[in-house]
Image (tube, rainbow, N blue to C red):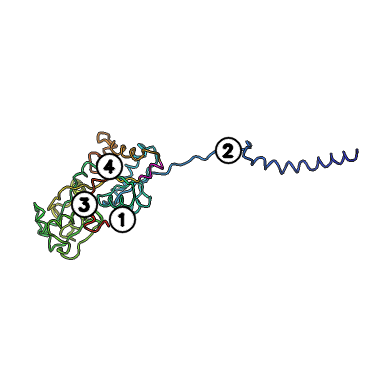
Amino acid sequence: MIKTLKMLRVLSSTLMPALLAVLLPLTACTPGSTSNPSASSEEPTTTQPFVTGAIPDQDPEQLQRLYSKLSDYLSEALGVPVEYQPVTDYAAAVTAFRVGDLDMVWFGGLTGVQARLQVPGAEAIAQRDIDAEFHSVFIANKASGIEPIDDISELQVLKDHTFTFGSESSTSGRLMPQYFLQQGNVSLDAFKGEVGFSQNHDATIKLVEAGTYDAGVLNEQVWNQRVEAGEVDLDKVQVIWRSPAYYDYHWVINPDVNDRYGDGFVEKVQAALLALDPTVPEHQEILELFGADRFIPTENSNYSQIEEIGRQIGKIQ
């Protein structure tokens, strides 16, 4: 009996350290263990950025400056990170909105309709004060001999001259001008050679100013801004006709942002845009870059004429 007890003591002293060496690490890994409190603490989450975009209707540097400032303002107003993501062309802006790469986009009338038709529940939420009655201007190189006109029926003076639109998907640089030309009985094959598509309003000015095309058409607001900045040679190019008014640019937002940032986020974004105040210096700079005094509410139904003409011309299927 004594020998047995001695043997048990020997075994205990030999095996216990080895057994503890195996069990202690396992104990430290159990859910209830408090040996490493930091291991069970949750990692902080990062809010997904609210991504904005815009059709590239002007010089890229101008757009970068504008939307960077707006992103800073919206980030502070909304309490979430806001990023501006440039796109290569008008169609890319519509595609990026459709697939969810852009949460909110500054569209023209036509691209806004195209985008909303592809994203159920998308809403037009705000436009500039000038967008409820927007205009295009037809311009001509003075050496072309084309003189200013007063009536839509006189657009026939453009026949047998070279002519350029802006982007193929531009509302003010293609869609509505083509509609007005049709109203004036001027078909696209009435021009000398094929019509051009300059890609943006600044390029249209430069092409007509240089005489590459006898005439062209663009966004009135861009024309006025460039003239005021002294960037147009008025000895070489002039406005020959101002179009009737129509609805144009506006912000379109994806309804999925409510799921990401909480109910009412769409309304919060709209309120932030409408709150831009020209009496606040930081806000005034943003509004001036947009060529507006303020933003006003808008809604999808305001662009029904744009949709109808888009279908007539074949830009909306």
The label shown at residue 91 is 1
Q: Is residue 259 magenta?
A: yes
Between 161 and 310, the one lying in front of the other is 310
* Distance from the alpha carbon under mark 2 to that under mark 1: 49 Å
Secondary structure predominantly adopted by residues drawn in magenta: helix
The label shown at residue 172 is 3
Between 159 and 310, the one lying in front of the other is 310
x and y, in percent, of residue 66 in the image: 29, 45
Q: Where is mark 2, residue-wise? A: 38
Answer left or right for 303 relative to 12: left
> How would you rate the neighbour count of disc 3 (Cα within 10 Å): few for under 14, some for 14-19, many for 20 or more?
many
Q: Which amino acid does label 4 sit on?
A: Ala
Which segment did they paint magenta? 255-260
* Distance from the alpha carbon under mark 3 to that under mark 2: 59 Å
Q: Where is mark 4, residue-wise? A: 126
* Distance from the alpha carbon under mark 4 to that under mark 1: 21 Å
Q: What residue type is labelled 1?
A: Ala
Element at label 3: helix
Viewer-side label of 2, 1: 1
The residue positioned farthest toward the top in the image shown: 279
Give the mark nearer the N terminus: 3 vs 2: 2
x and y, in percent, of residue 60 in the image: 30, 51
Circles 3 and 4: CB distance less than 8 Å? no
Q: Quadrant of residue 292?
A: top left
